[in-house]
Amino acid sequence: MNLKEWPVFKYINPEGYRFIGIFLGIAVVLALLGLSLLAKLFFLLALFSGYFFRDPERYAPLLENSVASPADGKIIVVDQLEESEVYGEKPCIKISIFMSLFDVHVNRIPISGKVVAMRYHPGKFVSANLDKASAENERQEIVIETAWKSRVAFVQIAGLIARRIVCNLETDDRVVKGERFGLIRFGSRLDVYLPVETIVNVHPGQYVKAGETVLGYLHYD
């Protein structure tokens, strides 16, 4: 049976199938060669890959102007900026979420609307919990415009161990809050930029869940 057909794989992101298959295959070969300790090690690596790439169901907040967290993790920054590279010269609120090795790494759309801009930056891989990661690390920017013309920007940022950002969006895509759009492997960060009028609903040190926790409420007429 193909790995994808196993019921348990319904709850694992497809990005993890290759890792699980490789580690399981090596474990079987090592077991057949009588190298039981090494076989157990690779079996454990396969189990950890399944854990890391887990992809639970989530239920987005219903209020239209609520902004859902795009990532699981800990809030490490809530700050008001006068200007930023991502949001331009307008004041905005920046919320940063740090994803540890043990958090769910599937990313979700924070607000319904249209993808109006995307920009990829090659860069470094400094630890994602440092402020300079926002400006120096490899990252993917996405900007969504809502039905009432507010703009929400969010940035996938690779971390110290992460070496792959997955983003399945394209400019002009219509997106729905809470739907999956990508992931970042093995410890990383997501920055969210909101209009300065946003009512913030989180604080530094708080743990949030992608697609469920409300980061804030946009102001609209």
Image: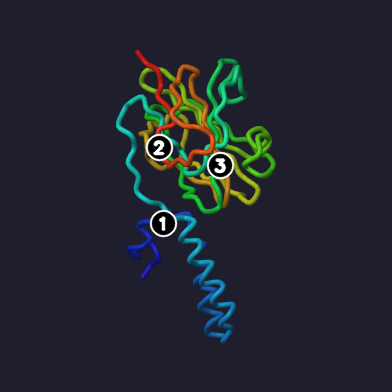
Q: Is residue 132 left or right of residue 200?
A: right
- Residue 63 place in picture, x, y as percent: 31, 28
- Residue 191 place in picture, x, y as percent: 55, 34
Q: In this rendering, which labeled residue sits more in front, label 1 or label 2?
A: 2
Q: Report the residue marked by disc 2.
A: 213
> Which residue occupies 43% across, 27% down?
216
In primary-sequence order, the first of circles 3 and 1 is 1
Disc 3 is placed on an element classified as strand
Mark 3 → mark 2, Cα distance in angstroms: 15 Å
Query: How many numbered discs sit on the rendered protein?
Result: 3
> Which residue occupies 38% across, 51% down?
56
Label 2 neighbour load within 10 Å: few <14, some 14-19, many 20+: many
Q: Report the residue marked by disc 3.
A: 98
- Residue 89 place in picture, x, y as percent: 60, 16
The N terminus appears in which quarter of the rendering?
bottom left
Q: In this rendering, which labeled residue sits more in front, label 3 or label 1?
A: 3
Amino acid type assigned to the residue bearing label 2 in the image? Thr
Q: Which mark is residue 12?
A: 1
- Residue 120 place in picture, x, y as percent: 59, 35
